[in-house]
Amino acid sequence: MAERGRPRAFDKEAALARAMEVFWRRGYEGTSMTDLTAAMGIASPSLYAAFGSKEELFRQALKHYSATEGEEIWGGVPGAPTAFAAVENYLMSTARVFTRRTKPPGCLIVLSALHPAEHSDRVRQTLIAMRAETVAGLKARLQQGVGAGEISPQADVAAIARYYVTVQQGMSIQARDGASRRELEAIARAALAAWPALIGAPPAAASA
Amino acid sequence: MAERGRPRAFDKEAALARAMEVFWRRGYEGTSMTDLTAAMGIASPSLYAAFGSKEELFRQALKHYSATEGEEIWGGVPGAPTAFAAVENYLMSTARVFTRRTKPPGCLIVLSALHPAEHSDRVRQTLIAMRAETVAGLKARLQQGVGAGEISPQADVAAIARYYVTVQQGMSIQARDGASRRELEAIARAALAAWPALIGAPPAAASA
DNA sequence: CGATTTATGTAATGATCGACACAAAAATCA
DNA sequence: TGATTTTTGTGTCGATCATTACATAAATCG
């Protein structure tokens, strides 16, 4: 390569991974520049030169999270053999990823910015959009299940997708409260127990 | 009454209600003294004289929340005719209370302090304990259902309670993301669809 | 080599955080 | 009335927030 100027003295990818973990554990607003520079092992001018600002660093941390943790949770969904297997894999992967001893519990995308605030509202809106995309992605996979004859065309796949994503988001709270992997798996199994009742025609009461 | 000294010039109960709503909307750390004094219509020395500190004000707001919103969500649970009716009432009340146009979406107890932080960790621990009490309360109501013969003695009532509380906590996230009352009710119905499968003996796979 | 470019460490910016000192105001008590 | 007690409004405390000036260090280019 041989680029001009003094070379960077730290590993940018490693520093980003550290930053991601701090945001994950403490939230966007709850993370201070002091927290970040301490965890990344660099001074603030280096952080600004490499990542732009706290908000831009967070956005790059979001990408890193999607590529690593997000992939581990969601990776099995698109190629799952059935719609049920996709949902099952999604929730069971969640139970595992949310309870690793070396990583913060729960989900970065769900927990990082839940409250409206002037100086973080763009971040919050981004996260809301990402969560909506999760519902849309699961709905799309369920729609495949309708095409495959696994799910009734009468079923409300949007509602089913929203339900399972809601359970997964609740698991973030539970993980924060100290729930074990086994407990999260039991929650996932309970949620999956509704499946047979959901994939048929909707009950008459729903359209009344 | 006739107490000594200059009388308070503001309504303490009304000011507490305003403070509760600010904490509810913006979270504990996300709420500043400036936010509070503006919403309550008083200056900070009056706030400190009447409520002690930001943390003590929050704790009193928590009590107020439990007595009003909490009661509206939970009130029907203890006296419900059946265990199923209790859970149904819990989730349906939640869908209504979480989506009132004049109030912040979602639950104060669930959303206010999810991240560990030095100057708010006692508050966070209190909220964790309150959420654990919710699970314990629902479990106790389900246990009554076991006694009444509605639920199999083999069923894992602790897991069932944790599952339904998890769904309700996920509904807080959904409400924050703009879900409507109808959408939350659909989530609740989907969660309730698991009920028949949950109240029998646990599947063999669960104990393997 | 000297000139240029980029990164680093120190230190400081203005803004905001929660909390409080202080004195004036408004009530009761003697 | 004067003494006592409590609240109110103004102003400010040190600490911390995200961000950046500035000078120095370390690399490449000519």
Image (cartoon, coloured by chain):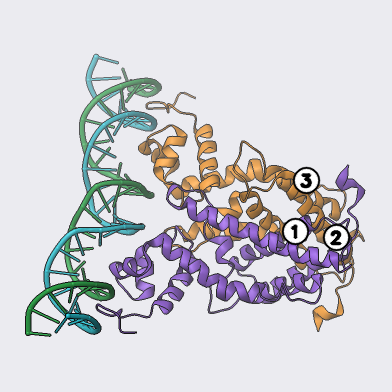
Chain colours: A orange, B purple, C cyan, D green
Residue A189 pos. (x, y %): 81, 53
Q: CA distance from mark 2 to mark 3?
A: 26 Å
- Label 2 amino acid? Leu
Where is mark 3, residue-wise? A76
Q: Amino acid at mark 1?
A: Tyr
Type of amino acid at the residue the image marks with label 3: Gly
**Disc 3 is attached to a residue of which chain?**
A
Q: Position of residue B8 (x, y in %)?
A: 30, 78
Position of residue A156 measured from the top left corner of the image (x, y, whole percent) = 81, 69
Tell me if label 2 and label 3 are in contact, CB under 8 Å: no
Q: Chain of mark 1?
A: B
Please say whether residue B25 is visible from this viewpoint. Answer: no
Point out the frontmost of discs 2 and 3.
2
Q: Earlier in the sequence, mark 2 or mark 1?
A: 1
- Residue occupying image coordinates x 53% and y 76%: B103
Percent position of residue A35, x then y: 43, 41
Q: Nearer the viewer, residue A39 or B145?
A: B145
The residue identified by callout 2 is B198
Please name the residue that numbered disc 1 is placed on.
Answer: B163
Q: Quadrant of residue A7?
A: top left
* Disc number placed over residue B155 in the picture, else none: none
Secondary structure at badge 3 equals loop
Residues beneath discs 2 and 3 located on the same chain: no
Whether residues under marks 2 and 1 lie with C-beta atoms below 8 angstroms apart, the answer is: yes
The secondary structure type at the circle numbered 1 is helix
